[in-house]
Image (cartoon, rainbow, N blue to C red):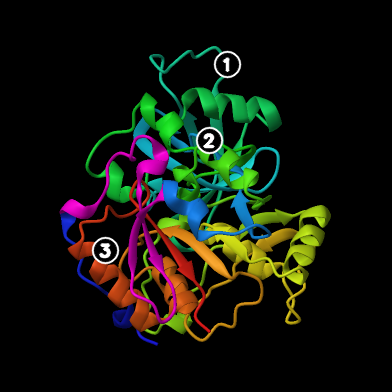
């Protein structure tokens, strides 16, 4: 398939810059095979599920992964900005850096300024270890483990998606808004945004009616925002992301399906991880590894019956995924409906509930 197959018109004013309040007041477009689209609210989600269904959520926690600093080379100091991408070891991260062309292995990067938040910790300095393809840089920090994570939390800014960051700056409100209420496992540099719509009260309503709730972890990397540059979609390569499905979670999901329950993934991240952990026979196994699964139309889904997800960028891997799940023609029509009905798009926008095409 060609990249142009996944293009659509989106007016600029449909991009949400702040989330709905309360979170579950966001709109919910229900897309079900063979039925008209239905315009609901996220608070109506319990009416779309039944006892025995299971919601699979990504409990990753977003770190303030955008760091400003200076490249130091002798007496020369040049302002730089890094968006951390993936933790490779206790002190080594890959990152996307701007400007990055003139960086060289061995360069020292000093992150943070004297006026930053509390500045109670030691210097957040790093050495450029190597440069990779596509502007990716490997940074070896002087700090390691919990000390490094604490310093990043002190000095960093929330890594708002480019389509929001281009329109306004990050602020303290984003530290809460850009985090799910069930976030626990620290390590993402982008939020699993479908989960931003849940409130503790909505979760209690769902659990009270017999809907299961299972956690998986996929640490989302900055590569999720990179555009597809190949006209032939099959030539695109995804960045790997680390994920985990526990033995217990796998067993409970298999039991739920055997009993007739439907597996509903909250977000494309939990869906991609669950599909990576599921065999051709449809059995979910425990998983603890990286995944670079790339889902496009023609993919045969093994685990997920439903998908709750936000509205995605034109020509993006995520629009390709939802088109694979519900059908390309169906999703083109659904997105045209959403634009016409003035749904809010992207990370802070409204949601859709998609049921898998047969």
Instruction: Identify residue for label 3.
Output: 338
Q: Residue at image x 42%, y 76%? A: 323
Residue 36 in magenta stretch: yes
Per the rendering, the mark at residue 121 is 1
Q: Residue at image x 39%, y 32%? A: 174
- For discs 3 and 1, the disc positioned in front in the rendered view: 3
Instruction: Give residue 286's position: percent from left, percent from top.
Output: 79, 61
Image height of 98 relative to 288, above or below: above
Q: Between residue 205 and residue 161, name the one nearer to us.
A: 205
Per the rendering, the mark at residue 196 is none
Residues packed near mark 2 inside 10 Å, few (<14), some (14 to 19) or many (20 plus):
few
Instruction: Give residue 34's position: percent from left, percent from top.
Output: 41, 82
Q: Between residue 92 and residue 227, name the one nearer to us.
A: 227
Q: Residue at image x 30%, y 68%? A: 314
Kindly state the secondary structure of the residue where label 2 is placed: helix
| Highlighted range, magenta | 13-42
Asked if residue 60 can be seen in this view, the reply is yes
Q: In which quarter of the image is the N terminus?
A: bottom left
């Amino acid at each position: 398939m060609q990249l142009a197959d996944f293009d659509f018109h989106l007016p600029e004013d449909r991009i949400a810059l702040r989330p709905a309040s309360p979170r579950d007041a966001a709109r919910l477009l229900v897309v079900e095979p063979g039925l008209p689209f239905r315009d609901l609210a996220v608070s109506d989600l319990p009416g779309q599920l039944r006892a025995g269904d299971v919601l699979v959520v990504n409990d990753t926690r977003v770190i303030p992964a955008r760091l400003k600093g200076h490249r130091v080379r002798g007496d020369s100091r040049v302002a730089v900005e890094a968006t951390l991408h993936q933790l490779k070891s206790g002190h080594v991260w890959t990152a996307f850096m701007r400007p990055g062309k003139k960086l060289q292995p061995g360069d020292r990067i000093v992150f943070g300024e004297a006026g930053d938040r509390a500045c109670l910790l030691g210097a957040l300095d790093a050495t450029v270890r190597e440069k990779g393809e596509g502007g990716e840089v490997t940074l070896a920090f002087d700090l390691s483990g919990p000390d490094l994570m604490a310093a990043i939390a002190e000095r960093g800014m929330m890594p708002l998606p480019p389509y929001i960051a281009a329109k306004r700056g990050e602020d303290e409100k984003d530290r809460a808004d850009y985090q799910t209420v069930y976030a626990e496992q620290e390590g993402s540099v982008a939020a699993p945004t479908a989960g931003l719509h849940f409130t503790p009260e909505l979760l209690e309503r769902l659990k009270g009616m017999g809907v299961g709730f299972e956690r998986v972890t996929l640490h989302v990397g900055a590569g999720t925002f990179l555009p597809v540059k190949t006209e032939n979609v099959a030539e695109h390569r995804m960045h790997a992301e680390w994920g985990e499905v526990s033995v217990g979670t796998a067993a409970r999901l298999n039991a739920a399906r055997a009993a007739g329950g439907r597996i509903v993934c909250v977000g494309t991240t939990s869906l991609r991880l669950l599909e990576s952990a599921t065999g051709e026979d449809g059995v979910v196994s425990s998983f603890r590894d990286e995944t670079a699964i790339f889902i496009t139309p023609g993919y045969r889904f093994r685990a997920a019956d439903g998908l709750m997800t936000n509205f995605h960028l034109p020509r993006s891997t995520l629009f390709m995924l939802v088109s694979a799940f519900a059908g390309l023609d169906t999703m083109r029509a659904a997105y045209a409906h959403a634009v016409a009905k003035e749904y809010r798009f992207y990370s802070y926008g409204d949601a859709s509930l998609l049921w898998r095409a047969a």
